Amino acid sequence: MLGASLPLSPVLANGLGTQGQRAGRADPGQADVLVIGAGIAGLAAARKLHDAGYRVIVLEARDRLGGRLMTHQAWDGINVDLGATWIHGAGPNNPIARLAKQVGARLATTSTDRTETFGSDGHRYDDDEEEALEALREAIEEAIEQTQDSDEDRPLGDAVREEMDYRSLGLAQRRQVDFLLNTTYEHEYGESVQALSLHTFDSGGEYAGDEALFLDGYRVLVEHLAKGLDIRLGQVVSAIDSEGEGVTVRVGGRSYQAAQVLLSVPLGVLKSGAIDFSPALPPEKTRAIEGLGVGVLNKCCLKFPEAFWDTRTDWINMVPEQHGQWAEWVSLARATGAPILIGFNAADFGREIEGWTDEAIVEDAMTRLRAVYGPDIPQPSDWAITRWASDPHALGSYSCNVVGSTVPMRNDLASPVDGKLFFAGEATDESFYQTVHGAYASGLRAANELMQAS
């Protein structure tokens, strides 16, 4: 969520109302299908069902569309995505890359080849130091390879540190190992290496291709998918009753009825128990909800009057004294022309700072930047700050595999219940969880399952 200093920029549905062979506008409380959640998974499912002629109502708890896609538009034509930002692996096989091409989205790329690294004392790493850091990265990868097939699952961090004899390393090397564990694994998966599963933390797949971001924000896909759909905002679902014929969904003091319901709410919301299911969900689905993890990756987006850093650089790495604090930044200057730096904080520290004020977060970020670029750099002219773990309609950034998580749990989470309840969302995608393309594909998969069961 944005800090109090900046307003939300809702992406609202336009042209509300359904069309199709089954009916025109749905009855105020009744439809063939209720889709719960207007993130990318729910919108993909609703779009497919609507185009197939189903009467669809989408119920969204927020006052905007997009879910964990949220484009900030308050900076004079500069669009900054506060949730998902990139198409990861934007090659021709990626469904989001194909959708972006279909809608004519303007894209730019960032590259890890354009990276600078700074030590905890603020000095820029030279070539020898970069090579030494890369050698440590390879040692970590080797440690994982040597231990990942062990009989008993355990925390990723424990396995790596034990295999590398972490305690025997000097302070500088320990800080570098912690930096690599944080930026390579905690930022990628959203959870502490002391919680991530050694066995399954990296069980997902990836597409080949560039890392592409939207110059107009992910909102262009949200608006495209939402066009013409009957979407009801501010509808916080509290209960789903699938006993008897059809399904009843309770929202505050009213109810919606449908033959089938497709849920695309985040795993964090399911884990919270905010939705009461009657009858209770099957044991294997409950075990999946409880057994999978939810990580957090927060952004501190700082807009400056002008860039004071090397604008040829995309990624700015800072080896911190304290584990996980302001270790990774992306510059939007080269890709977009905007003097914006985004600082990332994940896992434990990412959660901790959600309790801070915007001003405290910005000052902490600036303290780190001044240590690298000097005391005379300008203050940011504005900022946008996320708090995904505290967001009641997300309760985290994306799912992850913690100790005890198994690969089959995602299929259990995705499996339909009694031909009435269908499940979508990034957490239900075995191959591409944590990604927008995984969420989008899950919505299409769940819609197909629903149509086959109708």
Image (cartoon, rainbow, N blue to C red):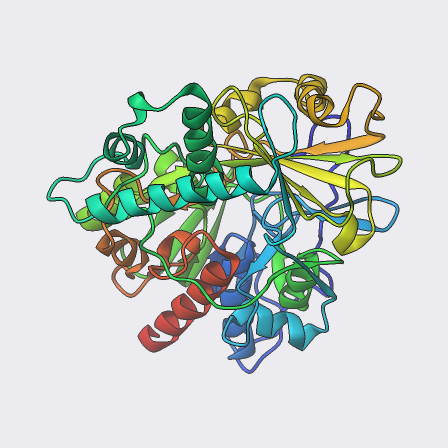
Residue 164, given in percent of the width and then of the height, sits at 28, 33
Left or right, 154 with reference to 433: left
Q: Is residue 184 visible from the viewing direction of this image?
A: yes
Residue 380 lies in quadrant: top right
Left or right, 150 with reference to 78: left
Q: Name the quarter where the C terminus is drawn.
A: bottom left
Left or right, 220 with reference to 305: left
Residue lying furthest left: 151
Residue drawn 24% across the image and 35% down it: 163
Looking at the picture, tell me which residue is in the foreground, 445 or 364. 364
Looking at the picture, tell me which residue is in the foreground, 397 or 10. 397
Residue 225 vertical placement versus 13 (above, below): below
Numbered marks: total: 0
Looking at the picture, tell me which residue is in the foreground, 303 or 327. 327
Residue drawn 69% across the image and 73% down it: 103
Residue 329 vertical placement versus 15 (above, below): above
Residue drawn 65% across the image and 28% down it: 123
Residue lying furthest front: 128
Residue 181, given in percent of the width and then of the height, sits at 41, 36
Residue 40 lies in quadrant: bottom right
Residue drawn 71% across the image and 23% down it: 362
Residue 75, given in percent of the width and then of the height, sits at 84, 43
Q: Is residue 239 visible from the viewing direction of this image?
A: no
Residue 422 vertical placement versus 183 (above, below): below
Left or right, 111 with reference to 252: right
Q: Name the quarter where the N terminus is drawn.
A: top right
Looking at the picture, tell me which residue is in the foreground, 276 or 431. 431
